[in-house]
Amino acid sequence: MENKDLKISMIQSHIIWEDIDENICYYGELLRRLKGKTDLAILPELFTTGLSLRAKDLAEPNDGKTVTALKQYASAYNLAITGSFMASDDGKYYNRAFFITPDGKEYYYDKRHLFSMAGEVECFSPGTRRQIVDYKGWKICLMVCYDLRFPVWSRNVDNEYDLLVYVANWAESRKKVWKSLLQARAIENMCFVCGVNRIGVDAREFKYHGNSLIYTPKGKKLAAIKDNEEFTLTQTLKYEDLDNLRSKFPAWNDADRFEIKVEGRN
C-alpha cells in the first residue's frame, strides 16, 4: 500500500479579543515555526476574533484579510491550514471553517449548530451542508465546536471521510464532555478525530481550557495537549491503521443510512 501517513499539528493558544490584525500576525508566527514539519496545521475556532457577537463589524468576505493572509502562509510554509473565522456572505454572517491548501485551493464549511446559550443565533446564520476535503489522499471532514454534540450531522456513512476535525472555543466547565464526545465520534465513525480548542479567558469572561486531542478510530488517545498550556503538538496519523481496522472489523457495512432534512435559519 502507498504510504499515506499524514502529519497534523494542533495549535493550542489564546486569542486576542476582536483584534483581527494582531491575531493574523500572532498565528502567522506559530505557523512559520511549522515550516517543513507538518502537512496540516489546525487553529482554534474564530481564531482572529474570539467568540464575539460583533459580526456586523468584524466579519469578512472570503477574499478579505484573513483568508488572504492564510493563503500566503500556506504557500510560504508549504502546509494546509484549517480553523474558522467570522465570514460575511450575501448580507449574512457565518462562523465559517476554512481549509486552505499550499497550492491555493480553498474549502469552506459554515457551522451548522449555533450555540444559542452564547448568543450565536443572534448574529450568525447556520450552515446547510457538510464539507469533506480531499487532501494528500485523506478525506477530511470539517466541523466546528457545538457541532460535536450532534452525532447524526457527522455520521460517516460508507467511510466518506477518514479524519474528523473539530475546531473550538469549548468552555472549561464542560471539559469532560469535550473529551467524551471526541472519543465517541472516533469510535462510532471509525475514523481519526482531532479536536483543537483555545485557552485563556475572553472579554465575555468565558474560560477555555484547551485540552486539544487526537483519538484513533478505536477510541485510543493518540495525542493530547495539557490543560491551559500554550503549545503546538505534531502527530503522524497512519492510514494503514485505519484501513486495517475497516477491513478486519467492517462495522460500517451495517450502519444506518440517514436522510437529514436541513432547514436554514435567517
Image (cartoon, rainbow, N blue to C red):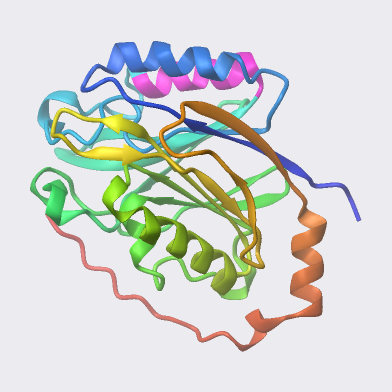
Give the x, y percent position of residue 221: 62, 55
Residue 27 highlighted magenta (yes or no): no
How many badges with numbers are in the image? 0
Give the x, y percent position of residue 217: 65, 64
Residue in front for this viewpoint, 161 or 261: 161
Residue at figure coordinates x 11%, y 30% from the top left = 56
Q: Going by the image, does 192 lie left or right of 169?
A: right
Q: What are the residue bounds of the magenta stretch?
A: 66-78
Q: Is residue 6 above or below residue 71?
A: below
Residue at figure coordinates x 68%, y 29% from the top left = 38
- Which residue occupies the extreme left position in the image? 122
Give the x, y percent position of residue 167: 42, 44
Q: The N terminus lies in which quarter of the figure?
A: bottom right
Q: Is residue 124 above or below residue 217?
A: above
On the image, which quarter does residue 190 sit in?
bottom right
Residue in front for this viewpoint, 212 or 85: 212
Residue at figure coordinates x 11%, y 43% from the top left = 123
Q: Going by the image, does 113 lie left or right of 176?
A: left
Residue in front for this viewpoint, 128 or 19: 19
Q: The C terminus lies in which quarter of the figure?
A: bottom left
- Secondary structure predominantly adopted by residues drawn in magenta: helix
On the image, which quarter does residue 154 sit in?
bottom left
Residue at figure coordinates x 28%, y 42% from the top left = 95
Q: Is residue 129 visible?
A: no
Residue in front for this viewpoint, 137 or 37: 37
On the image, which quarter does residue 31 sit in?
top right
Q: Going by the image, does 40 lie left or right of 108?
A: right
